[in-house]
Amino acid sequence: MKEIREAGTWKEERSIITPQRPHIEVVDGESGLPRPSLNLCANNYLGLADHPEVIDAACQAMREYGFGMASVRFICGTQDLHRKLEECISKFLGTGDTILYSSCFDANGGLFETLLGPADAILTDELNHASIIDGVRLARARRRIFKHADMSDLRLGLDETKDARIRLIVTDGVFSMQGDLANLPEICRLAGEKGALVVVDDSHATGFVGPGGRGTPEHFGVQSGVDIITSTLGKALGGGTGGFASGRAEIIALLRQRSRPYLFSNSIAPPIAGGALKALEIVQREPERLENLRRNTSFFREAMTQRGFSISPGGHPIVPIVLGDEKLTVRAARELRERGVFVVGFTYPVVPKGKARIRVQISAAHIREDLETAVRLFSEVVSPTGQSHPSGPQGI
Ligand SMILES: *Cc1c(COP(=O)(O)O)cnc(C)c1O
């Protein structure tokens, strides 16, 4: 623990005393008093976490179906509500069937070992989410890590694993620490050429990336080339909890028989299922939310760029502001919080050593004034060039 503290990577949790939304109140560590803050680090991309209709639907589901199931799905934990949510997700994504898990972490944990054995091979991007890394470790298949977004390394990996029975390529749809999208057109093309399967974890895309919010396969128009999508209900779709895997009916049927986090962990709670169903309905009913999110994102990206910050290009609401040094990043984030902008410094092991950053996440629920305030405070606290700022603390 001493080493972690000395490295500047100790993570403090801060208590929020309001629902999740753009304007929250956070208990100050020193004074113990709540501080009104502009929240720039939630995965609440569509602003559905405190949406009155989502809350009502969750309450309604709880009244009708109870608080919890006290059972796994296959014993006595399946309600028609669970099936309804699975069917709605399948319809939304255009897949054959969907299986719910307690989290996307579990969806990834239960995927690879169920489908693959020692005769098979997994090709995995080096920056994939921790849950994919762990899921891949559990499988007895051969593992080939390819360099981040490096399609020639992926091709090489496919050639090296020619003799495998099944080859499966797995990638994040959106990489959470950078906000960059996987090159799905090329991945799907290579998979088609080499006869491999494609798995996309679309946790940072489901509900808001693509013209209809159906995620990165829709964004790139390669829905038919993706075999399995894993994703979360814990981000844009209300941010409650829960995850799923979605794909061809036969694959999902096998997961229901053999996937360990599904067989050995409780059903998702009725209010969660009810709230998520409503969130999906709102996404499809109110395309203006997606439009707002896009407008907000391009406004913030452009305004920050104009102030001299170098931001990796793209249109995703994840906007990383890389400062490099761990302690400097933690200090800058703290100063921003003290001035009422709630952001967190990301340090090792969440990002590589020396690549510390403040990750901003834009929401459809932010208003223009929120974003203007954020840009102004960022330029007051953080020098874009990384040199010490006249008005800021030394080195920030
Ligand atoms: C957030 C995230 C997860 C975990 O989702 P939970 O439902 O919170 O477990 C998995 N994969 C990716 C890519 C994520 O961003």
Image (cartoon, helix red, strand yellow):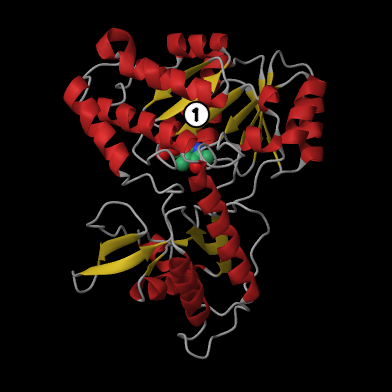
Q: How many marks?
A: 1
Task: Give above or below for 367 relative to 116.
Answer: below
**Badge 1, how many Cα within 10 Å: few under 14, some, many 20+?**
many
Task: Give above or below for 252 relative to 395.
Answer: above
Q: Residue at x 45, y 47 (%)?
A: 46
Q: Is residue 329 left or right of residue 180?
A: left
Residue 68 falls in image quadrant = top left
Q: Residue at x 36, y 32 (%)?
A: 278
Task: Give above or below for 376 relative to 266.
Answer: below
Say whether mark 1 is within 8 Å of ligand 1: yes
Q: Is residue 59 left or right of residue 273?
A: left
Task: Give above or below for 86 relative to 257.
Answer: below
Q: Is residue 129 left or right of residue 67?
A: right
Q: Which residue is mark 1?
A: 108
Label 1, secondary structure: give it: helix
Residue 124 falls in image quadrant = top right
Residue closer to the observer: 16 or 11: 16
Residue closer to the observer: 316 or 351: 316
**Location of residue 52 in the rendering, given as x and y in whole percent from the top left corner:** 28, 43
